[in-house]
Image (spheres, rainbow, N blue to C red):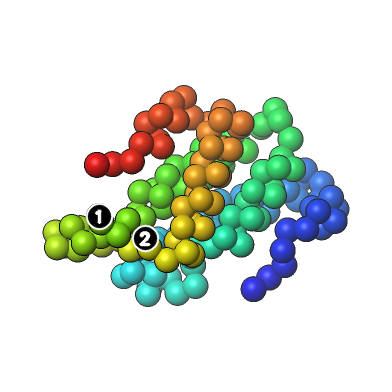
Amino acid sequence: NGYEPTTSLLCQFDQIIIRRVLNHHVEFVSQISLSPTENKRWGEYTMSKARGKWIYALLSRLEKPLHRDEASSLSTLLRELCRLRSELRFDEQAAQDNSNGSNGIVFGDSSQKDVLATLNTLIIIVGIYFEQCSSLDSIMKVKS
């Protein structure tokens, strides 16, 4: 399961390590899919609360101003987090979507609620604090 991102561990990281590990997580998040058919293909590649903790912790230690490479990486992270958020399906939507042949994860158990909360938190941090989105209104809208 790996290590938790403890304060003592994170304080040992300099900015170079923070950026490298964050880039690793961005690449990993780019590989994740929440649809059931994709999860079977990728196996253990999932967006979990633990992965969200790591990304949150690394973002908390990332210093501003950002280099253009980090800005690009955070822009990719924001895009991928929004993609994952859009793949979540609520219980009411899932019944309609399944009848229409749409795939996506049924959002009802507590682990998926944790994933949604994690995704929303990371989207806001990357979008607002790191200034990677001009309009979060369009990102945070719930499709009807």
* Residue 143 percent coordinates (x, y): 28, 41
- Mark 1 residue crowding within 10 angstroms, few (<14) / some (14–19) / many (20+): some
Among the two numbered marks 2 and 1 on one chain, the one whose residue lies closer to the N terminus? 1
Q: Is residue 64 left or right of residue 37?
A: right
Asked which secondary structure carries label 1, the reply is: helix
* Residue 124 percent coordinates (x, y): 53, 37
Residue 108 seen in this snapshot? yes
Q: Residue furthest top?
A: 134
Q: In the rendered view, would you say 105 is above or below 30? A: below
Of 16 and 128, nearer the camera is: 128
Q: Which residue is mark 1?
A: 93
| Residue type indicated by callout 2 | Phe
Q: Is residue 121 left or right of residue 20?
A: left
Identity of the residue drawn at 41% across and 37% down: 140
* Residue 112 percent coordinates (x, y): 45, 61
Q: Quadrant of the N terminus?
A: bottom right
Q: In the rendered view, would you say 130 is above or below 5? A: above
* Residue 57 percent coordinates (x, y): 69, 50
| Mark count | 2
Asked which secondary structure carries label 2, the reply is: strand
Residue 72 seen in this snapshot? no
| Residue type indicated by callout 1 | Gln
Q: Which residue is mark 2?
A: 107
Q: Marks 2/1: CA distance?
A: 9 Å
Identity of the residue drawn at 67% across and 43% down: 59
